[in-house]
Amino acid sequence: MTAHDPNTPSDPSPEALQRTLREAAGGDESAWREIVEWFTPRVFGLIRANCGDPELAEEVTQWTFCKVATKLGDYVESGRFEGWIFRIAMNRLRDEMRRRKRHAAPMEAEILGRVAPGTYDAEPVDRRRLFNALATAMSRLSPSDRKIIELRHVGGMSFRQMADFLEEPLGTLLARHHRALRKLREILGPGIGDDVEDLA
């Protein structure tokens, strides 16, 4: 399974990212557009998965890139840019959620479909039932397990990027991801759980 939307631009190489960040920090508008193109889908996907509100996700995503633009001149690329930008976005989301005194809404069907893509093959009535079951199962996971799944399968982060973002050893993170998916399969039971089994 592709961890993120297939329409998301492919990851730049570390060298290309470093060069583009340097050029963008120097005022190159085309370089900045490349950064926005590379990272907007993932930032938006992660924030939307965590708040369930596309308008709020759009607002936080726009704010995040405005913030990054002001800080880019001081940023030193060390292979952790995505973790850095995700952290800025998540901090902003927490601030907004506190300010609005809102609670996270259930993940929407199209987001849930990335966690169990096989559900898209079902008939519309069955698909709604499957999505509801998956949403309920996700809500029964611990916040830490839910975050692992969202970062990997909604945010599209690699395990190395997740390890940097969460500041955990890679081996620990891989084990946590495996346990989180196993718990999700157990909650779902036979059927839907089989779709989750193929996630990597």
Image (cartoon, rainbow, N blue to C red):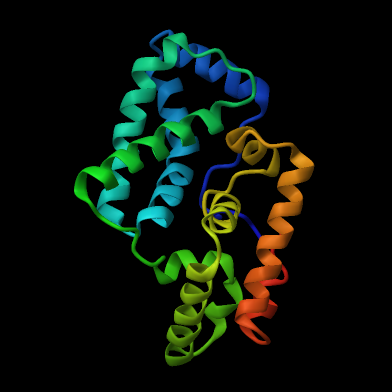
The picture places residue 38, in percent across and down from the top left corner, at 50, 36
Which residue is rendered at x = 38% and y = 11% of the image?
A: 27
* Occupied quadrant, residue 196: bottom right
Which residue is rendered at x = 46% and y = 64% of the image?
A: 111
Front residue (pair 183, 64):
183
How many callouts does the rendering have?
0
Q: Is residue 112 visible?
A: yes
The picture places residue 96, in percent across and down from the top left corner, at 26, 42
Front residue (pair 23, 119):
119
Q: Is residue 131 above or below residue 170?
A: below
* Occupied quadrant, residue 90: top left
Which residue is rendered at x = 22% and y = 51% of the image?
A: 101
* Occupied quadrant, residue 119: bottom right
Q: Is residue 73 above or below residue 93?
A: above
Answer with left or right where residue 187 lies relative to residue 20.
right
Give the position of the N terminus as an image quadrant: bottom right
Q: Is residue 59 visible?
A: no
The picture places residue 33, in percent across and down from the top left corner, at 40, 28
Q: Is residue 166 above or below residue 133?
A: above
Answer with left or right where residue 137 lies relative to residue 163.
left
Q: Is residue 69 above or below residue 135?
A: above
The picture places residue 128, in percent across and down from the top left corner, at 43, 84
Give the position of the C terminus as an image quadrant: bottom right
Q: Which residue extends farthest right?
A: 171
Q: Which residue extends farthest left?
A: 100
Which residue is rendered at x = 66% and y = 29% of the image?
A: 13
